[in-house]
């Protein structure tokens, strides 16, 4: 039987060019757009369906959070990269087989190892002791695998972001602060965020059409405090204030600029384009992406579209010829 374990495929500029036409790129971009649509005008506190699969992922994330509590940081002088993080990742690897076998029902159990690769690479890199948007991508790919297999349905999607992704962010931020993880591939002040991107994209969708909260509301500390538990965007801004000092416009000029945009709808659409340009188009990030059976590095979708387009043009020519 062919192995289900995903591997890295983007190793050259030609691979990067192919990536944009690949089935995996299509699936991933459509997936994040679908998730954004499904949480429009919904708060994190919204009651939504919690299936057994969703609850299991939440339980696993709780286990990982508890594992951080059981693994205190080493007493060391370095600003970034507490070596206790490597101890934490080793503990995760020790538990990984037990965790991975619970992901899927028996009929899909052959795919557990594929999901395991995405999951285990969602929490940073133990060699570099860093975390970045590439690890965030892996978690989104991990969630997509459940959807591709039909284990979660459209009805589960609000919970995947409002509950699961929100809890994943809690774990990721806990890792960042407890172990002083270095930002992976950060653009410094000219990046959207040192560690994350999607909380802003998804969070803007949650706020589309809000009657009182506008993009400029992020500058009101009272509003941030009151609504950080309800909206991913506000929690992300609040977190920045917790880990950075100084004027917001100095350490986060891109987010400060976005606060001048008129509507959340424009923020949401603009961030989607920015995600494609600044994350999914960058070789240093996507070279670490994994491809397997569920997210294949093939271009079958493009070929089918081209074939359909050619057949459509052929049919139009026949009709035009007959009309003449």
Image (cartoon, rainbow, N blue to C red):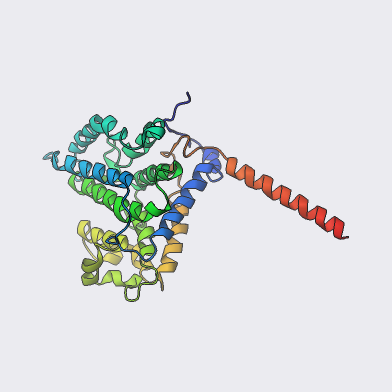
Using the rendered view, name the quadrant where residue 158 is placed. Answer: bottom left
Tell me where residue 126 sits by quadrant: top left
Horizontal side of residue 308 vs 265, given as left or right: right
Quadrant showing the C terminus: bottom right
Q: Residue at x 73, y 48 (%)?
A: 311
Please indicate, yes or no, whether residue 153 appears anywhere in the rendered image: yes
Q: Is residue 169 left or right of residue 300?
A: left
Farthest left residue in view: 75
Q: Is residue 195 among the parts visible in the rendering?
A: no
Q: Residue furthest top?
A: 1
Q: Quick one: which residue is furthest to the right in this view?
A: 324
Q: Position of residue 307 (x, y in %)?
A: 68, 45
Relative to 237, say whether 110 is above or below. above
The correct choice, above or below, for 168 with respect to 202 in the image is above
Give the camera-side residue of 309 and 246.
309
Q: Report x, y in % for residue 40.
A: 39, 63
Pinpoint residue 170: horizontal percent, then vertical percent. Answer: 24, 51
Whether residue 282 is situated above or below residue 12 in the rendered picture: below
Question: Percent position (x, y) of residue 290?
Answer: 43, 37
Q: 52 above or below 45?
A: above
Q: Is residue 100 left or right of residue 77?
A: right
| Total tally of numbered discs in the picture | 0
């Amino acid at each position: 039987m062919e192995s289900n374990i995903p591997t890295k495929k983007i190793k050259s500029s030609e691979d990067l060019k192919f990536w944009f036409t690949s089935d995996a790129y299509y699936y991933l971009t459509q997936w994040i757009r679908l998730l954004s649509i499904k949480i429009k005008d919904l708060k994190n506190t919204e009651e939504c369906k919690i299936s057994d699969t969703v609850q299991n992922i939440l339980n696993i994330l709780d286990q990982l959070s508890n594992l951080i509590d059981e693994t205190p940081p080493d007493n060391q002088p370095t600003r970034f990269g507490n070596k206790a993080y490597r101890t934490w990742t080793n503990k995760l690897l020790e538990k990984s087989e037990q965790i991975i076998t619970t992901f899927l029902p028996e009929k899909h159990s052959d795919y557990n190892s594929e999901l395991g690769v995405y999951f285990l690479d969602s929490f940073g890199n133990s060699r570099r002791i860093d975390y970045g948007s590439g690890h965030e991508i892996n978690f989104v790919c991990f969630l997509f695998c459940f959807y591709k297999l039909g284990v979660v349905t459209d009805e589960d999607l609000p919970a995947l972001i409002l509950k699961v992704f929100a809890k994943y962010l809690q774990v990721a931020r806990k890792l960042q602060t407890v172990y002083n993880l270095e930002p992976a591939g950060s653009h410094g002040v000219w990046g959207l965020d040192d560690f994350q991107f999607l909380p802003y994209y998804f969070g803007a969708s949650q706020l589309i059409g809000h009657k009182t909260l506008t993009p400029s509301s992020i500058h009101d500390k009272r509003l941030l405090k009151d609504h950080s538990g309800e909206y991913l965007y506000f929690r992300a801004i609040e977190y920045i204030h917790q880990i950075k000092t100084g004027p917001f416009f100095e350490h986060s000029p891109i987010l400060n600029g976005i606060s001048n945009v008129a509507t959340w709808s424009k923020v949401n659409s603009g961030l989607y384009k920015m995600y494609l340009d600044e994350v999914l188009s960058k070789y240093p990030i996507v070279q670490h992406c994994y491809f397997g059976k569920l997210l294949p590095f093939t271009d079958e979708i493009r070929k089918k579209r081209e074939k359909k387009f050619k057949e459509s043009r052929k049919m139009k020519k026949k009709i035009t010829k007959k009309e003449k």
